[in-house]
Image (cartoon, rainbow, N blue to C red):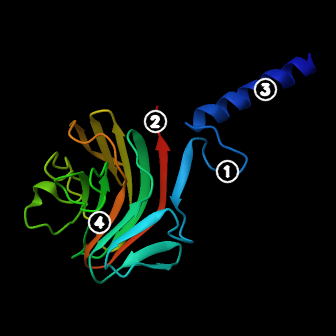
Amino acid sequence: MKGSFTVTLGLCLLLLGLVSSPFPSSASGQEVGWTTLFDGSSIDGWRVHGDANWELADAAVSADRGSGYLVTESSYGDFELTLEFWVDEPANSGVFIRCSDPDNIGAANSYEVNIYDTRADQTYRTGGIVNVAAPTSVINTGGQWNSYEITAQGSRLVVILNGTQVVDATHDQFVRGPIALQYGAGTVRFRNVQIRVLD
């Protein structure tokens, strides 16, 4: 009887563990299926495009002069992307996905998930996808660490900013390409960039 109770208790604890985490963990502690694109120690796997003064410090990559992008060497189609960013109030930045021309990146040839609280036209401010979808909530991000969760699956694009879903749109212009982190103005920092490729 005691052995039966122990087995039942063990199964219950196992099930609770599976429910509490949406992804099973690997031995290293990283969630299965996720790949770290930037861990704060180097920009291996990224190409520097432009003259932004990217520097590594405090487990982040930052820039405050010039202009340009960090561009992944790999190309991605359907994926979930998570990252953290810190910007000052006048910063102009963004996360570009499915870049169809990685040597000439812009909102006309990729999806730009914007980071720009003080954009003159607030339609596509921080949280929005430029020329595609305005954010449903106004969330100011200056002076603090913020999180983005970006999902691109087929024609569906979902953006979650600091835990709030701000975009759920359908658009089928760009299907695959590298990911680019932009520096345009102000002070911009990125850290903890991870991706999970979707089948």
Q: Which residue is mark 4?
A: 141
Image coordinates of residue 65 in percent, x first then y, are 29, 84
Report the amino acid beneath label 1: Gly
Image depth: mark 2 or mark 4 in front: 2
**Mark in the foreground, 4 or 1:** 1
Residue type, label 2:
Leu
- Vertical arrangement, residue 31 with respect to residue 10, above or below: below
The kind of residue tagged 4 is: Thr
Judge from the rendering whether residue 89 lies leftward or rightward of residue 27; answer left or right: left
Image quarter hosting the N terminus: top right
Residue on which disc 2 sits: 198
Q: Is residue 97 left or right of residue 1?
A: left
Which residue does the image show at 49% across and 53% down from the upper left? 194
Circle on res. 29: 1
Q: Under tag 4, what secondary structure?
A: loop
Q: Are marks 4 and 1 in contact (CB under 8 Å)?
A: no
Q: Are marks 1 and 2 in contact (CB under 8 Å)?
A: no
Given the image, on which type of amino acid does mark 3 rest? Leu
Q: Which residue has dot 3 on it?
A: 9
Q: Residues within 10 Å of mark 2 (few under 14, many from 20)?
A: some
Circle 1 — which element? loop
Q: Earlier in the sequence, mark 1 or mark 2?
A: 1
In this view, 159 is above or below 182: above
Mark with earlier residue (3, 2): 3
**How far apart are labels 4 and 3 at the CA level?**
45 Å
Q: How far apart, in angstroms, are the residues tagged by discs 4 and 1?
A: 29 Å
Q: Nearer the viewer, mark 4 or mark 3?
A: 4
Spatial separation of the CA atoms under disc 2 and disc 4:
28 Å
Splitting the image into 4 quarters, where does residue 11 fall?
Answer: top right
Q: Position of residue 174 (x, y in %)?
A: 25, 42
Q: Earlier in the sequence, mark 2 or mark 4?
A: 4
